[in-house]
Image: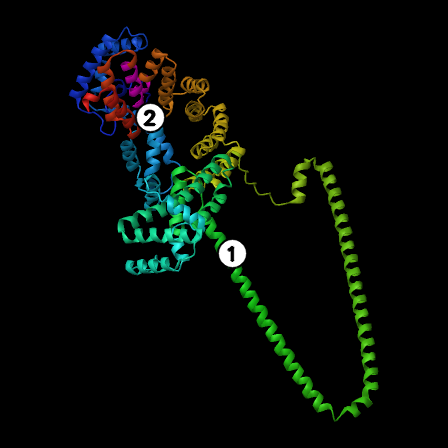
Amino acid sequence: MSEKIKNNWYKILELEYYPNPVEDEDVIRDRIEDKKAFWAKKRNDFSKGKEYTKYLELENKKVIEEEMLDPENNKRKEMIRELQNILFKAVDDMLEFCEGEYISSKVVKEFSKQEGLDEKLIKIRLKEKGKRIEEYRNPIYENYCENLKKKITNYDNSKKNLDLLGKKNLYDFLNSEGIYCQSETDTEKILEKIEERRKKLVKPDAETSAKKELLSECHLIFKNTQKKREYDEYVEHLKYLEVSKELEKLKILSENSDFLNLSNKSFKYLKKIEEILRNKEEAKSIFVGFCRAERIPYDIQENQKNQSQNQNQNQSKKENERKNQSSTGSQSQQRKTSQNQNNNGNNRNSDNRSSNNRNNNNNWKSDTKKKKSSGAAFVWVIVAMLAIVIAVLAISKKDNQRQENRSQNVQQDISQKQTTNNTPKEEVSKEVSKEPEQTKEIPEKTDEEIGKEYFDRGMSEYGKGNLSNAINLLKNAVHYKYGKAMYNLGKIYEDMGNYPEAKNWYKDASDRGDKNSMFRLAFIYQTKDGNLEEAKNYYQKLIDEGSTNNSYFYSAKNNLGIIFYSENEIEKAKELYEDAINGNIVMGKIGLGDIYYYKYRDQSKAKKLYEEAINEGSDEVKRIAQQKYNKLFPENQ
């Protein structure tokens, strides 16, 4: 924009500016008249009277009409653009860290809830920015969750007998009795085998009676298709209960351990789940679904890498063993051939032993002479090499002396030139040395540039779901004084549920003036710690130091209004709610509706505010507003 807009009339007149901005001039005129009447009525209002009086004065000067009914629409377009930028600043900031074309629908839902923006509007904005919504579905995990919620038929009698025999379920028991009903499809045959086995049990002891009761129960269950289906659900439910215990342990670990190593530790739980379910694909789907739902870091590929490395190591060991075997085999063959050759040589020389014995003395003498001559030659070679080394050293020494003499002569010449020609020393030294100019050194990167590189890499890893790497890289960015990484570290830890660590990073960032960190820190104090005084301090600090361009500015006003309402500071809460509503925080309408209903006893006004929240709010805002509306106005359902 060429110049800053003093009064954004789209916001003041509460006209729609996204996704379908109001452009009809008749509608704009009608809204100006409505607002004019409202301002005149409220000009003596304690909190907003001055503001309303200012708007009336501008209207009397026809300023609103001039700016809103401009024939070229330039001013209106600037107002619409400004409000859209404010509305979607948080969305656009998020998109900076989202690589690729797709964004998961779950991320959109959580972001909508967090920012108080309508999910539909966020999707429209994402579409404008070239992003596509990816619907993540995990039917196996969904079935797991549904099964845990179901009311399952209990089989307590069979459980006692199974515990006595040390069996998990009826299928396990039948397998131990030689009846493999899971592989047998003919129900009649299974029932016959059960009956035959039951008749053979005659011992009068507790174990036999337990087996008889279990076989009778198996007969009843397998005879009825519905009962068998119910028992199968019960068996699946027992397995899923074991799985849920392991996953709850993982959740506790994620809340109380170092998150950098959590993804590696999570493999142990995946292995346990595989052992329980005896189905790798099912275990993996449930594990991944749970981790994504609870925001627990995991990295299944790493486990696969370790397995592939082990396989490669095993293969290399086998290849080395084969090579060793082949080399030992070839050596043994060589030994055999040499032995055969020796045997043949011995056979050939058996007739000539006498002649060889005669010549042994002469051969021994000649060998000793050869040894002596070879030893003497070796000594002479060493002596010659030493002589050569000494000669080289002497020559190099003479060369050094010559160079020193030359340099002394040159310096004398220089001094003579200086005395005769009065030339500066620097010029003479340049003429004599004639050394090439040194190349310019490449400037080193600043700490901020290094920190920025670590930050970008960290956010890239975060976008891929590699939280351990992301945290390490972001901490390196902080080490190099790149303060922006502090907020992102706090957000990652907050999403993981590690609120103490999140608060530490948010505090550090807040001390450096980061407004987003102030809001998140206040939100944790308000909703997780119940420390309302600290929450108020940070919300107020954000409001005092922030600006309307900050995406959290109006959310801070709304949340501060909630705190003041809980402390019965009604007028302060009302003013904050109204400011939040002016900043397009629809949640403020619910709070303001509560004030009108419970404090001012104005049910019609409260009803209107709740209805507006239902129509305009995000899914979460709609749900809260609808619950209040149904409770307070049951006659309108």
| C-alpha separation, residue under disc 1 versus residue under disc 2 | 54 Å
Does 425 sit left or right of 521 as displayed?
right
Examine the structure image and report whether residue 592 is included in the region drawn in magenta: yes
Query: Which quadrant holds residue 69?
Result: top left
- The front one of 474 and 590 is 590
**Measured along the vertical axis of the image, is residue 226 above or below residue 111?**
below
Image quarter hosting the N terminus = top left
Residue in front for this viewpoint, 241 or 426 = 241
Q: Position of residue 434 (x, y in %)?
A: 64, 45
Looking at the picture, how far across and down is residue 566, in whole percent? 37, 16
Q: Are marks 1 and 2 in contact (CB under 8 Å)?
A: no
Residue at 60% of width from left, 72% of height from top?
Answer: 327
Q: Amino acid at mark 1?
A: Asn
Name the residue that disc number 1 marks.
Answer: 310
Q: Is residue 168 left or right of residue 447?
A: left
Of pointers 1 and 2, the one earlier in the residue sequence: 2
Where 282 sits versus 513, above or below? below
Three-letter residue code for mark 2: Ile
- Can you identify the residue that label 2 sits on? 86
Disc 1 is placed on an element classified as helix
Callout 1: 10 Å neighbours few (<14), some, many (20+)? few
Residue 584 percent location from the top left of the image: 30, 23
> Of helix, strand and loop, which one carries label 2?
helix
Q: Looking at the rendering, in which quadrant would you find the C terminus?
A: top left
Image location (x, y in percent) of residue 252: 47, 36
Q: Is residue 511 left or right of residue 423?
A: left
544 or 575: nearer the viewer: 575
Q: Is residue 601 magenta?
A: no
Using the image, determine if residue 100 lies above or below residue 336: above
Characterize the magenta stretch by its predominant secondary structure: helix
Region in magenta: 579-597
Please, which residue is most extreme toward the top here?
44
